[in-house]
C-alpha cells in the first residue's frame, strides 16, 4: 500500500553517532526518522510506517547537513563535523583518530574503560565530552 500524501507524520529518534567538529569539540548527532499513518486514522487506529524521510540534528537541536565529501555541517554555525568511528567493543580505540583524541584530552584506557580525572567511561565520546566541560569550567 502506498502512503497517502496527506498522511500526518511524526518523527522518532533513530541512530545517534559522535562526530568531531573543526572546533575541536565532540558533537552528538541524532537521526530523526519520519513515520506516517498509512491508514490516515480511518480505521480508528493509526498504522505507522516510515516515510523514507530522515533528518539529522545536533544535540542542541540544530539541523545537520551531509556534505558531498561525507562530512557533516551544523547549519547556521559553519562547524564542519567528521564522524568518529565507534568501537565494536567499548574501551577499544578504533583508529588513530581515537588515539589522538585520547592524547589531546589526557584520557587513558584502563581495564577496557576510558579514564579522565578519575572518572571511568565505556565510550570515548563520553570521556571527551566530560573533558570538554571540565576544561571550559576551569578556563572561565
Image: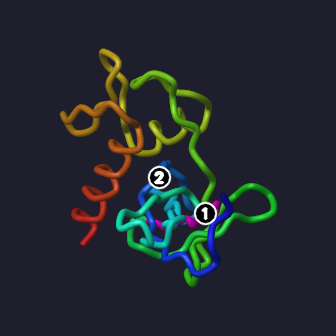
Which residue extends farthest top? 111
| Vertical comparison of 116 with 73: above or below | above
Q: Residue 111: x and y, percent?
A: 30, 15
Which residue, given by chain and number where applicable, does mark 1 sit on?
51
Which residue, given by chain and number where applicable, does mark 2 sit on?
14
Query: Which label sits on residue 123?
Result: none
Q: Is residue 124 magenta?
A: no
Quadrant where the C terminus sits is bottom left
Q: Which residues are magenta?
A: 52-58
Total residue callouts = 2
Please name the residue shown 28% across and 59% down the image. Answer: 133
Which residue extends farthest front? 43
SS at mark 1? Answer: strand
Q: Residue 137: x and y, percent?
A: 22, 64
| Vertical comparison of 88 with 58: above or below | above
Q: Residues within 10 Å of mark 1 (few under 14, many from 20)?
A: some
| Vertical comparison of 106 with 140: above or below | above
Q: CA distance from mark 1 to mark 2?
A: 14 Å
Which residue extends farthest left? 118
SS at mark 2? Answer: strand
Seen from the viewer's position, the closer of residues 65 and 14 is: 14
Main secondary structure along the magenta-highlighted residues: strand
Quarter where residue 56 is shown:
bottom right
Seen from the viewer's position, the closer of residues 78 and 48 is: 48
Q: Earlier in the sequence, mark 1 or mark 2?
A: 2
The way the protein has been coloured in the rendering is rainbow
Amino acid at each position: 500500500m502506498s502512503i497517502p500524501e496527506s498522511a500526518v507524520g511524526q518523527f522518532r529518534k533513530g541512530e545517534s553517532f559522535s562526530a568531531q567538529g573543526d572546533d575541536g569539540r565532540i558533537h552528538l548527532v541524532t537521526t530523526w526518522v519520519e513515520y506516517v499513518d498509512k491508514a490516515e486514522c480511518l480505521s480508528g487506529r493509526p498504522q505507522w510506517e516510515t516515510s523514507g524521510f530522515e533528518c539529522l540534528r545536533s544535540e542542541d537541536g540544530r539541523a545537520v547537513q551531509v556534505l558531498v565529501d561525507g562530512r557533516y555541517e551544523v547549519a547556521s554555525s559553519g562547524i564542519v563535523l567528521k564522524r568518529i568511528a565507534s568501537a565494536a567493543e567499548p574501551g577499544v580505540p578504533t583508529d588513530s583518530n581515537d588515539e589522538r583524541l585520547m592524547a589531546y584530552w589526557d584520557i587513558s584506557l584502563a581495564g577496557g574503560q576510558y579514564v579522565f580525572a578519575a572518572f571511568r567511561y565505556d565510550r570515548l565520546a563520553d570521556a571527551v565530552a566530560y573533558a570538554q566541560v571540565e576544561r571550559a569550567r576551569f578556563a572561565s
